[in-house]
Image (cartoon, grey):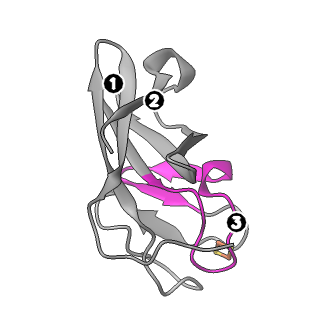
């Protein structure tokens, strides 16, 4: 597997999240600043809600269902009720496009199964 183009910066305003699919997995892209996008699995580890429906603050995304926030580098929950991390993936921005490598998970979180 390699990096695949999944969005453009025009799809994603700073401070917002976007649901995409990478190698068959739902992934939440988060644009944290003008030049940086992070990729985290789009499934909250608490009750499997879409993280892309939530809110971005600094380097975290907050689940809209019960309020757990997740660090976008470690995938670790920063607040209850979630207690397990969410997978995070290699992501880069190149020439206005967002690229994610679904085979390059950056932490050891279990991939949610539906
Ligand atoms: S489903 Fe995300 S905090 Fe409950």
Query: What residue would you read off at disc 2?
Result: 14
In the rendered image, the residue lying farthest to the top is 95
Q: Is residue 66 visible?
A: yes
Q: Quadrant of the C terminus?
A: bottom right
Query: What residue would you read off at disc 1?
Result: 34
Going from the N terminus, do you reach mark 3 or mark 1 first? Answer: 1
Query: What residue would you read off at disc 3?
Result: 49
Q: How many marks?
A: 3
Query: Alpha-carbon distance for marks 2 and 3?
Result: 22 Å
Look at the numbered disc 3 and say if its residue's Cβ is closer than 8 Å to ligand 1. Answer: yes
- In magenta segment, residue 73: no
Q: Secondary structure at mark 3?
A: loop
In the rendered image, the residue lying farthest to the front is 1
- In magenta segment, residue 50: yes
Question: Which residues are the magenta region?
Answer: 40-62
The residue that appears at 46% across and 84% down in the rendered structure is 84
Q: Residue 30: where, in percent of width, then height?
A: 46, 42
Camera-nearest label, 3 or 1 = 3
Q: Residue 71: where, in percent of width, then height?
A: 37, 64
Camera-nearest label, 2 or 3 = 3
The residue that appears at 54% across and 37% down in the rendered structure is 16
Q: Secondary structure at mark 2?
A: loop
The residue that appears at 62% across and 64% down in the rendered structure is 63
Q: Are marks 1 and 2 in contact (CB under 8 Å)?
A: yes
Going from the N terminus, do you reach mark 2 or mark 3 first? Answer: 2
């Amino acid at each position: 597997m390699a990096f695949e183009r999944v969005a453009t910066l025009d799809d994603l305003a700073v401070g917002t999240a976007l649901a995409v699919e990478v190698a068959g997995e739902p992934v939440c892209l988060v644009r944290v600043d003008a030049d940086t996008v992070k990729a985290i699995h789009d499934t909250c580890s608490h009750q499997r809600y879409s993280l892309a429906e939530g809110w971005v603050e600094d380097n975290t995304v907050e689940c809209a269902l019960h309020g757990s926030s997740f660090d976008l580098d470690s995938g670790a929950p920063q607040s209850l009720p979630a207690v397990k991390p969410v997978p995070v993936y290699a992501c880069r921005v190149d020439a206005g496009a967002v690229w994610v490598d679904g085979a390059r998970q950056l932490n050891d979180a279990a991939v949610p199964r539906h």
